[in-house]
Image (cartoon, rainbow, N blue to C red):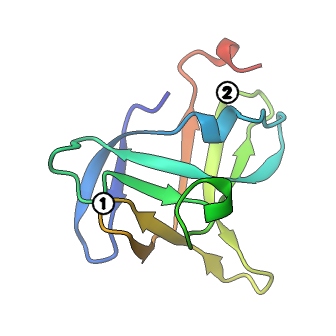
Amino acid sequence: MLSSLRVSYPDGISESASGATQRGLTEPQIGRGATVLRTLAILSGSPNAARCGRVLFGEGSQGAGVGSDSVRVTRSVDGASWRIQSNVYADGTLRDLALCENTGVLLHMPVDFSIVADDPTRFP
């Protein structure tokens, strides 16, 4: 589902990612045009040299990174894409904590990207 994604860490280091978890986008199903809070994992493209292995977004009670923030996922009206954005507090400031799985360190990592399905018919 994801052709390319680059993870840029707060200290300036960046690496290519091989994908993002499809489960966070599809289980449970997000209705077309809906926005929900979800957990999400961004997977490193090079597991042996990866800095974080997986960058985890989502509260620990939801099975993702302990202390990290959920992301807002908005599905397009045609159902073929999902926009992933940092969640926000009531005052508009970002809830952008992500957990680096390899080190257990929480990082401020705002996100705003889209995922487009290669085959939209797979996602009702």
* Number of numbered discs: 2
Label 1 or label 2, whichever lies nearer to me, is: 1
- Position of residue 113 measured from the top left corner of the image (x, y, whole percent): 53, 51
Q: Residues within 10 Å of mark 2 (few under 14, many from 20)?
A: some
Q: Is residue 45 left or right of residue 40?
A: left
Q: Is residue 37 above or below residue 121?
A: below
Indicate the secondary structure of the residue bearing disc 2. Answer: loop
Q: Would you identify the image quadrant in which residue 37 lies?
A: bottom right
Q: Is residue 12 above or below residue 74?
A: below
Residue placed under numbered mark 1 in the picture: 102
Q: Residues within 10 Å of mark 1 (few under 14, many from 20)?
A: few
Residue toward you, 90 or 50 = 50
Q: Is residue 43 above or below residue 12?
A: above
Indicate the secondary structure of the residue bearing disc 1. Answer: loop
- Position of residue 64 measured from the top left corner of the image (x, y, whole percent): 56, 56
Residue placed under numbered mark 2 in the picture: 80
Q: Residue at x 37, y 69 (%)?
A: 104
Q: Is residue 99 above or below residue 22?
A: below
Q: Residue at x 54, y 68 (%)?
A: 66
Q: Is residue 4 left or right of residue 48?
A: right
Q: Distance from label 1 to label 2 (Cα)?
A: 32 Å
Q: Residue at x 23, y 43 (%)?
A: 47
Q: Is residue 11 left or right of residue 24?
A: left
- Position of residue 74 measured from the top left corner of the image (x, y, whole percent): 73, 47
Residue toward you, 53 or 84 = 53
Q: Reading the chain from its start, which is encountered first: label 1 or label 2? A: 2
Type of amino acid under label 1: Asn
